[in-house]
Image (spheres, helix red, strand yellow):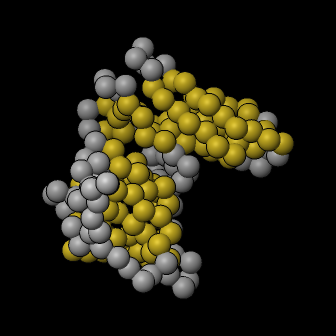
Amino acid sequence: AVNSSVIGSTDQRVAELCASAEGSHVLYSVQNADGTVDVIHNNNGSTSSIMTSVAAAGLAYENGKFYWQVDGAIYCYDPISNSLEVIIPPETASVSSSYQYTSNGDKTVIVWLDEEEQETAIKASVLTGNQWSQEVVLLDGIAEHVTFFDAVMLDDGKYAVVLNTGAI
């Protein structure tokens, strides 16, 4: 038998959801009639709105915090301290909703696809101390449409990226 419990429910249309490793915190987005979403935190059945009427996407949970993208920026929400911050503002980089958070223990990066009309680039922002860098190009000139990708940072600080591509 599986040991499980229900910590909440909603009658709203859930667009995305992400649970903490501990299981007591869930972040989810619900679809509004105008196409925007509200980002909601559920802590053992108690809910609170974190952001409303935004184009949020890419909910993720890493190292005790939730992350998501809105209009090229990456937001970070700490469910323990109930604090929200923009960790990568759109002035620093224009992160797509297909971003990946990866770390090798020493270095942490957020990697994303930057798709132009005729080619795609893979870009990243590196965490140094408590600051995220300006965007850096890891790979550019990809002349095919990237449908899926995954990225990891290796122990030596290099990146390994897997792409699924097709004609643009």
Q: Where is residue 12 in the image (x, y as percent from the top left)?
A: 44, 81
Q: Is residue 86 visible?
A: no
The x, y position of residue 151, in whole percent, is: 53, 33
* Outermost residue, top side: 156
Is residue 4 or residue 126 the one in the foreground? 4
14 in relation to 80, above or below: below
Q: Where is residue 32 in the image (x, y as percent from the top left)?
A: 50, 81
Q: In which quarter of the image is residue 62?
A: top left
Q: Which residue is drawn at 48% across and 55% down?
A: 58
Identify the residue at image location x=15%, y=57%: 81
Between 43 and 40, the one nearer to me in the picture: 43
In percent of the image, x 84 and y 42: which residue is there?
Answer: 167
Say which quarter of the image contains residue 29.
Answer: bottom left
- For the point 28% across and 42% down, the residue is 63
Q: In which quarter of the image is residue 84?
A: bottom left
Number of labels in the image equals 0
Q: Do we see residue 166 in this rendering?
A: yes
**Residue 43 in the image, given as x and y percentages of width and height:** 22, 66
In screen coordinates, is 43 left or right of 12? Answer: left
Q: Is residue 25 above or below residue 114?
A: below
On screen, residue 112 versus residue 107, left or right, reads right
- Residue located farthest toward the front when viewing the structure as drawn: 1
Q: Nearer the viewer, residue 141 or 100?
A: 100
Q: Is residue 125 positioned above or below 49 on the image?
A: above
Check the picture and name the quadrant holding the N terminus: bottom left
Q: Residue furthest left?
A: 81
Q: Is residue 58 above or below residue 150?
A: below
